[in-house]
Image: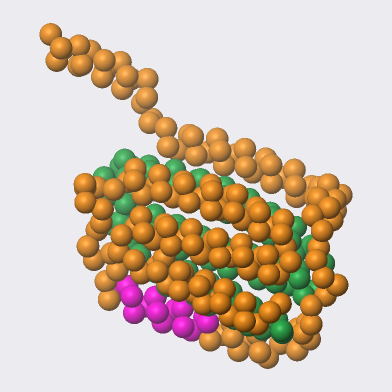
Amino acid sequence: MPLQPLLLLSAALFCVGIYGVVSRRNAVGVLLSVELMMNAVNINLVAFSHYHGSHVGQTFAVFSIALTVAEVVVGLALVILLYRAEKDVAVDGVQALKE
Amino acid sequence: MDPIAFGIVAACLLLAALFVVSSKNLVHAVLWLAVTLATTAVLFVLLQAPFLAGIQILLYTGGVITLMLFGVMLTRRHERVFIENETSSRRRVPGILAAAVLFGVIASATYKTPGLPTATGRGSVSTQEIGKAFLTDHLLAFEVLSILLLVAMIGAIVLARKADFGKERERVIPVRGEKAT
């Protein structure tokens, strides 16, 4: 099987994630969509690693997964902070970073 | 890789991803994300990356999903679970446009790029190789990553902690005493 279908699958997942980021109003929903996008990136890395027969792609994917987890932790902390400040987590009203 | 297996996994992935971005109830969206991530682990197994499949299940399906569920439940406003007008057409149309344009660009680039590998390489990459690469070629990145995780942890605690935590405790306790008397 050629590589292209895998790349297309990952591109499609990434685009679904972009749609989610643009259309969700809830901040946690936006974070979920960002997760989808990161997942698409990992699929790409692993696919290239498999087709080139090299371990570098998988090593990079492990780094990327750890980065994603760190991002989720900080993102959720920000969402909870937002909820405490505004009593709401809809992203369209938020403009101030600091009260 | 077996094309039929790939087709099934790809269909499951796309369907679950669409439910993640479209379901009204955010708890359901998180659970659909769990399905997406677990299916990705299956895809990793098909791509002969068992170590990454394990990490995917452990970190994403175990850790991130739990965190997300906490996030949803800590930030909901009312008893009933969710927000009407979660997506309005004002936001949906630009979203679909952006996604479609980007997908078109990537798809055409994918098919126009010469020299993409067509057959698989030398087969499975062993976990041993990945571990060795961590501690030899990518040692610096590995150490920087561990510092980043520490910083993210401290940052999350600092951000989510109440700013006047000490004061609030002092304030709360007498009030309770007052009610009791």
Looking at the image, residue B75 sits to the left or right of residue B177; the answer is right
- Identify the magenta region: B90-103
Q: Give the mark count.
A: 0
Q: Quadrant of residue A43?
A: bottom right
**Quadrant including the N terminus of chain A:** bottom right
Q: Residue at left 68%, top 70%?
A: B46
**Quadrant including the C terminus of chain A:** top left
- B172 in relation to A68, above or below: above
- B96 in relation to B181, above or below: below
User: Can residue A98 be seen here?
Assistant: no
Identify the chain drawn in green: A
Majority secondary structure of the magenta segment? helix
Residue B121 placement (x, y as % from top left): 83, 75
B100 magenta-colored: yes
Residue B130 placement (x, y as % from top left): 80, 55
Residue B5 placement (x, y as % from top left): 62, 77
Q: Residue at left 20%, top 11%?
A: B177
Identify the chain drawn in orange: B
- B158 in relation to B22, above or below: above
Q: Residue at left 46%, top 83%?
A: B100
Give the residue furthest to the top: B181
- For this rendering, which residue is in front, B33 or B77? B33
- B120 in relation to B130, above or below: below
Looking at the image, residue A31 sits to the left or right of residue B130; the answer is left
User: Can residue B135 be seen here?
Assistant: yes
Q: Quadrant of residue B83?
A: bottom left
Looking at the image, residue B73 sits to the left or right of residue B127; the answer is left
A8 magenta-colored: no
Q: Residue at left 77%, top 75%?
A: A51
